[in-house]
Image (cartoon, helix red, strand yellow):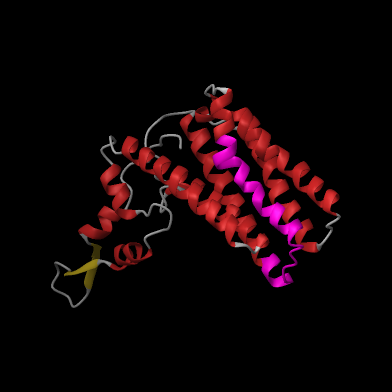
């Protein structure tokens, strides 16, 4: 399957550049989109070469490849088509926001995928540290943020609808399937309770940090001793083990 994904992602740079040349569209918005989505394709190829995902190594029929491209990968190219057809010209502040979101998304995706890949080379299990300490799917979150930056540059509702379709039909089932698989680990319940699927549980973290019980010192003095409560202790990871591939 990886050849289908690599064809679309790696070919995005040439595809967008060809669109710009054919339509003679050389606006700043088009160039920024080319830089963002095109560089992501190259980053993906590099990631696949250095940290190949076992899920994408499975064989796929030409019919399956066509459906994958037509229903999932191909619609991503609607954004650059709309940019050149509509001669979209976004303000500088929006392009800056999109670029910042793209950078954050790439770092989240690449760093968490790298942690997962190299950790699993040593031992399998539940990853509950690093990028996975507060969020259970930081790699998916990163990919969602960076693709949202592409839709932001396009400035059209259609790319957003494509993202909603992919997130609900592909990403969500994958994340739920991963969680069902990880639930077999004894530490899963505690890990799930203190983390969010895509965003950190900030309220729970604050409660755990501030939860404490004051008890008198045995010598009868006015001093007191503050010890963590059960909630605070439970919030700390008890196992530093590793996780399933996404």
Give the residue displayed 36% in from the left and 38% down from the top: 177
* Magenta-drawn stretch contains 8: no
Q: Which quadrant is home to the N terminus?
A: top right
User: In x, y percent, where is residue 16?
Assistant: 76, 48
The image shows residue 131 at horizontal and vertical percentages of: 48, 49
Q: Give the residue at the far bottom of this rendering.
A: 222
Image side of residue 208 versus residue 154, left or right: left
Residue 75: in magenta span: yes
Horizontal and vertical percent position of residue 133: 41, 50
Dividing the picture into quadrants, the one containing residue 134 is: bottom left
**Residue beneath the point at 63% across and 28% down:** 3
Is residue 149 shown above or below 61?
A: below
Q: Is residue 218 left or right of residue 106?
A: left
Identify the residue at image location x=60%, y=46%: 75
Count of numbered circles in the view: 0
Main SS category, magenta section: helix
Q: Which residues are magenta?
A: 68-96
Q: Nearer the viewer, residue 183 or 168?
A: 168
- Residue 21 lies left or right of residue 103; in this view the side is right
Residue 67 percent across, percent down from the top left: 55, 33
Quarter of the image for residue 104 reads bottom right
Q: Residue at x 69, y 49 (%)?
A: 37
Relative to residue 208, is residue 109 depicted above or below?
above
Front position in the image: 245 or 208: 245
Q: Which residue is nearer to you in this view: 64 or 2? A: 64
């Amino acid at each position: 399957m990886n050849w289908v994904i690599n064809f679309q992602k790696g070919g995005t740079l040439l595809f967008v550049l060809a669109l710009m040349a054919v339509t003679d569209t050389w606006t700043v918005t088009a160039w920024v989109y080319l830089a963002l989505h095109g560089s992501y394709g190259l980053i993906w190829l590099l990631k696949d070469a250095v940290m190949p995902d076992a899920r994408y190594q499975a064989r796929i029929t030409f019919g399956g490849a066509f459906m994958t491209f037509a229903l999932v990968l191909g619609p991503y190219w609607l954004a650059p088509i709309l940019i050149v057809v509509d001669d979209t010209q976004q303000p500088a502040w929006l392009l800056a926001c999109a670029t910042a979101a793209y950078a954050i998304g790439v770092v989240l995706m690449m760093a968490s995928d790298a942690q997962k890949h190299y950790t699993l080379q040593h031992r399998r299990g539940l990853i509950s540290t690093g990028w996975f300490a507060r969020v259970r799917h930081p790699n998916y979150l990163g990919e969602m943020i960076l693709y949202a930056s592409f839709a932001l540059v396009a400035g059209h509702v259609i790319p957003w609808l494509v993202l909603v379709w992919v997130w609900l039909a592909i990403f969500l089932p994958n994340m739920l399937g991963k969680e069902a698989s990880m639930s077999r680990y004894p530490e899963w319940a505690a890990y799930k309770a203190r983390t969010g699927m895509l965003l950190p549980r900030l309220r729970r973290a604050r409660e755990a940090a501030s939860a404490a019980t004051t008890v008198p010192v045995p010598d009868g003095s006015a001093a007191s001793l503050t010890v963590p409560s059960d909630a605070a202790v439970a919030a700390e990871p008890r196992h530093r083990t590793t996780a399933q591939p996404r």
